[in-house]
Image: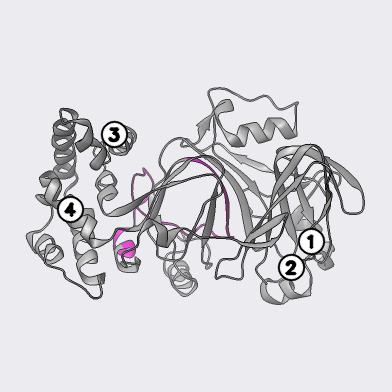
Amino acid sequence: MELQCKVQNYDWGKLGKDSKVAKLLSSSDPDVQIDLNKPYAELWMGTHPNGPSIIIERKKLLSEYLKDNVDAVGPVVKKSFGVSVPFLLKILSIQKALSIQAHPNKEHAEQLHAKFPDMYKDPNHKPELAIALTPFEALCGFRPIAEIKEFLHKIPELSEILTKDSVNDLLNYKEGDSTIVLKQIFESLMTCDKDVVAKSLEKYITRLNSSDEDIKRALLYETLQKLHTEFPGDVGCFSLYFMNYMQLHPGQAIFLKPNLPHAYLSGDCVECMACSDNVVRAGLTPKHIDLPTLIDMLDYKSYTPEDLLFYPSIEDENSCIWRPPVPDFAVVKIKVEIGNSYNTRIRASPSIIIFISGEGEACDTEPTRVRPGTVLFLKASRQLNITPSGSHLEAYQAICNV
């Protein structure tokens, strides 16, 4: 069954036809007019109440259809999640950095919802998987401490605004659990007076402007400039020197487990997540910042970028699957070349499938012409036959990880 899905026009999205979201939207429906001056940030595929998908042929919300067709969910998913699609599949097109944030685990989410229901509107966790479609930039997890030490030596404008104890403790750190020193210094940064941070950033960028290119590269000048242009004087600009700066190639992925600090900076990706709105923010945002909650909950382990890459396993010559350590979702990438036909694997879960490139036909009970941007819902324990009419067909399939 083909779905009509919700576009979110958040101001951080890419404008007009620069956006992958807009390209998929116009490809799937040639009658859609793309506004070249409007941001097209996210395409939502699922039953989330803030952007529910509609079954086109029935003119009915997918969530309402499931209530009347419980078999579409399947007994395994029904037992764990009720009559629902517990994941939200998205396409993101990012021009302007998203906030530095983390997501609570299930137990913490329940506590936050009970205590602050207006701020944390549901009791669910929000693990996320991001798979790059284009070159993709993100900040993710705390850097190895040796790298942070080096930046503190090279950036006096940063070390001078932090408490002396936090700097000394980190510089003297040798080995063992990094939680105490990283929490102390990150809290010192994030609680620093806003005017002090803004002046320090201005002083630092002025110095870098006249530095040679090797120094600029070593100190991530271009990324710093981007963040400071988008969020002038924001403390999040200095987070660049505490968190891993990651550049994903198309097909690479990161899994954002609970409490892991992160921020998407630019690019297009497929994202799948548990259905929740629970975000705890710290910087690079005009939205509400809950600093005490964030400081207490963060994962202060040091990671390398390689540690944070999340790899799929091969299922067959046409598909691979990313299986995060959560039951809410997994994502399958499917690619079928011209001259071949492929039957998707039978899953004990309902599926949402978006076609990213190529053209052809997909058949469950009735054939559907598919092209980039076509989104289909597939009932549990059903197969979809995919046949390209051009050079290939490529799709991403979200399922429950059961």
Vertical order, 393 against 75 (above or below) = above
Q: Earlier in the sequence, mark 4 or mark 2?
A: 2
Question: In the displayed image of the protein, which residue is found farthest to the top?
Answer: 36
Q: CA distance from mark 4 to mark 1?
A: 55 Å
Q: CA distance from mark 2 to mark 1?
A: 7 Å
Q: Earlier in the sequence, mark 4 or mark 1?
A: 1
Q: Position of residue 246 (x, y in %)?
A: 39, 49
Q: Earlier in the sequence, mark 4 or mark 3?
A: 4
The residue that disc 3 covers is 225
Q: Earlier in the sequence, mark 2 or mark 1?
A: 1
Q: In the drawing, does residue 223 fall left or right of residue 383?
A: left
Q: Are marks 3 and 2 in contact (CB under 8 Å)?
A: no
Q: Are marks 2 and 1 in contact (CB under 8 Å)?
A: yes
User: What span is in magenta?
Assistant: 267-294
The residue that disc 2 covers is 83
Q: CA distance from mark 3 to mark 2?
A: 47 Å
Q: CA distance from mark 4 to mark 2?
A: 52 Å
> Dot 3: few (<14), some (14–19), or many (≥20) neighbours within 10 Å?
some
Which residue is pictured at 33% across the width and 62% down the height? 294
* Nearer to the camera, 283 or 335: 335
> Dot 2: few (<14), some (14–19), or many (≥20) neighbours within 10 Å?
many
Vertical order, 369 against 346 (above or below) = above
Q: Earlier in the sequence, mark 3 or mark 2?
A: 2
Mark in the foreground, 4 or 1? 4
Q: CA distance from mark 4 to mark 3?
A: 20 Å
> Dot 4: few (<14), some (14–19), or many (≥20) neighbours within 10 Å?
few
What's under tag 2, amino acid-wise? Val
The residue that disc 4 covers is 150
Q: Is residue 370 visible?
A: no
Mark in the foreground, 3 or 2? 3
